[in-house]
Image (spheres, rainbow, N blue to C red):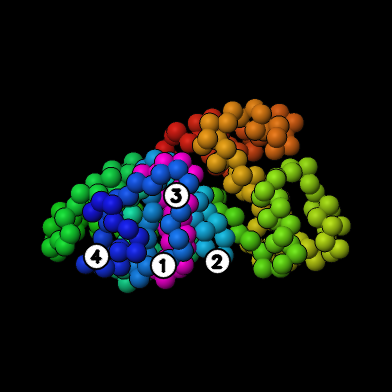
Amino acid sequence: MRNVHASRADDLPGAIVATANEYPVNHRVQRHRHRRSQLLYAASGIMIVGTETGRWIVPPERAVWIPAGMHHEVRSLVHVSTRSVYVDPAIDPALPADCRVVAISALMRELLLETADLPLPYARGSRTDAIFALLVHEIARAPVLPLDIPMPADARIAARCRAYLRRPAVRDSIDDWCQALGMSRRTFTRRFRAETGLSFAGWCRQATIFAALPRLAAGEPVTPLAFDLGYDSASSFTTMFKRVVGVPPSRYLAQPS
């Protein structure tokens, strides 16, 4: 079904349903939740999804998995064409229990594009039923991408993290943060990993990518962006980006996984 507002998705009949929507630049879908889990796929464009626990960036040809009942909001950074598949979590216990950005295989991409015009409701054993069943299997095995940015619960550390997201400074060291926060290196390291699930260096790499992707989506050249983020060269930024994401920034937004 096309152009179904997020608030109406729960009213659609069936254990698995699908919708297709177009969102203009800087459109915001206000915080809401669904009774089914949602796979939100960016066929084109780039989105940011926010929850109580963090934010996820969703570039073209990627998708975010949002578990049932999780409050979330969505913002489009450019024009976005989406496909959503809503799945009753009781369908398959192998489905993820956490929010995550996942890679989309060629098979998943074709299945997701096909969902826009599938009839609802549908009969058990029908073509629609078969497509949805295969999608559920593919969702359970989709590779997770490091495109989330978890925020610590500690208010002082979180404030420092938010400042870093606004203006990444790759030359910042863990000792700089410890000194600014008045914490020992051991205490900071233990607390930071416990509250984010990442090392300090790992979090900073993901935060830098999180800050860079919207600017790349807007067409900003790699070289001035790399210098602005504090890298000594475009090649050093590209090396970091490719190590985390898997492809260089010049190709990332255009190339499917």
Residue drawn 24% across and 46% down?
114
Q: Residue 8's quadrant in the figure?
A: bottom left
Q: Is residue 46 visible?
A: no
| Mark nearer the viewer, 3 or 1 | 3
Q: Is residue 70 magenta?
A: yes
Q: Is residue 44 magenta-colored?
A: no
Q: Residue at x 60, y 59 (%)?
A: 150
Viewer-nearest residue: 47 or 232: 47
Q: Quadrant of residue 170?
A: top right
74 relative to 5 in the view: left or right: right
17 and 6: which is toward the camera = 6
State the residue at coordinates (59%, 55%).
149
Kind of residue indicated by mark 3: His
Task: Of the two numbered discs 3 and 2 on the same chain, state the one appearing first in sequence.
Answer: 3
Hey, which quadrant is residue 208 in on the image? top right
In the rendered structure, which segment of residues is drawn in magenta? Answer: 63-81
Amino acid under disc 1: Arg
On the image, numbered disc 2 is attached to which residue?
52
* Residue at mark 2 to residue at mark 1: CA–CA distance: 12 Å
- Circle 4 or circle 3, nearest the eye: 3
Looking at the image, residue 86 sits to the left or right of residue 189; the answer is left
In this figure, which residue is indicated by the disc labeled 4? 12
**Upstream in sequence: badge 3 or badge 1:** 3
Question: Does residue 238 appear left or right of residue 232 in this picture?
Answer: left
* Disc on res. 27: 3
Comes first in the chain, label 1 or label 4:
4
Q: Is residue 8 visible?
A: yes
Q: Which mark, by number, is residue 33?
A: 1
